[in-house]
Amino acid sequence: MKDRYRTDLFVQHLYKDYPGKLRFDPQKIQTREAFFAWKQQVREKAYELMQFPDNAYEEPQVHFISSKQRDGYRVEKYEISPEPELWVPFLVLIPDSATAESKAPGVLCFPGWDTPKEVLCGEDFTDLTYESTPYACAFPFSNAMALNYVRRGIVALASDNAGTGEQLGVYDRQQFALKMMFKGRNYAGLSVLYRWAMLKWLAGQDYVDDSRIGLAGHSFGTETSMFLALLEPRVKAVSHNDFMSDNEQRILSCFPPEEFMFGGHVHLVPGMLEWFSFPDLIAAFAPNPMLLSEGGVQDDLERIGKAYALAGAPEQYQYVHYPEFQDPASRPLDHQPIPEGITNEEYFRYANVVPEHHFYKSEICIPWMIKALGGSAASDNE
């Protein structure tokens, strides 16, 4: 009788016995028509979960701040306001070759946890009121994704995660996110709102080819890119640099309270897991080009592949495991049931993750993005 009163076991029951209502299930969704009907449902629910404000501007306000010439490109700084009292700074790296007569592709770059946009651009940020952390400046060459893109002739836009970099406030990000939830908003929705406004602005610049726009997300930045890619039809390709796993399964597996996965309110989209989890958002981006450059749980990777096959574009989906797990023989836990009550470290073995080697895989992502934006993709207007 002792376990009869354990509320933690009740929560485990919710996750085991009530999967997301819009979970992509290849056993149930077996035709192209059924896939695109499911995709539209996911898109509509994702929009609803973002909790966008009623007073968002149809045309965001944008102010030019500065411009600096670099070798082969220039760095321009702007600020944008998608709703009253919210101003967000961002940087745009524009190759000298990009003109109204010779338009370039555009890529929006979303950083990891607290990496400032200046690191993405290879710019100095020591004059900003920003307290650096070891993570913020880790792997500066690889994580300078915007700089690496502009050097390949692509216009690159970089923005901070809300509550980091120049957007630091008087209370920390977790408190900021919690206070937003009390008012019916959420951190992910705010991030998508202002980055969607940036995308619309970028698409309107005369030196950008608005038919060739991509998203490059690293780690925490992938949460924005998954939602934005689904909501904005002009997003042609996504470079997703984080391991892929089912949120529900991870919560179910990392059972001990000290192993709870999310790391705070900034990750929470209230109600999301009632409907779907991250692999479903990725699957719903089919048939457009998608790269997962840090692998993940093999079952989840293959489930996404089945969505792309249904959408008629299996070749548009690619995943690459960490180098340590490229050889299938190095992944003995693939397709094995993931147990409950394990630690995050144990979970990473099932997800084929090497946390200390977690950085933007520029040598993989950038050539892939160039090809994806230069080639033709299956239409998303099904």
Image (cartoon, rainbow, N blue to C red):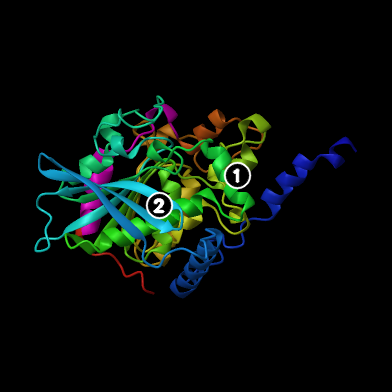
Q: Nearer the viewer, residue 342 or 169?
A: 169
Measured as percent of width and height from the top left, residue 325 is found at 39, 34
10 Å crowding of disc 1: few (<14), some (14-19), many (20+): some
Measured as percent of width and height from the top left, residue 371 is found at 21, 54
Q: Nearer the viewer, residue 147 or 276?
A: 147
Measured as percent of width and height from the top left, residue 97 is found at 9, 52
Residue assigned mark 1: 178
Label 1 vs label 2, nearer the camera: 1
Viewer can see residue 248: no
Distance (Cα) linking label 1 and label 2: 22 Å
Residue assigned mark 2: 225
Asked if residue 58 is positioned above or below residue 360 in the image, the reply reads: below
* Amino acid found under the numbered disc labelled 2: Ser
Q: Residue at (10%, 39%) from the top-left corner?
A: 71
Q: Residue at (29%, 54%) from the top-left corner?
A: 63
10 Å crowding of disc 2: few (<14), some (14-19), many (20+): many
Q: Is 143 contained in the magenta span? A: no
Q: Which residues are magenta?
A: 353-373
Closer to the chain start, of discs 1 and 2, is: 1
Quarter residue 317 falls in: bottom left
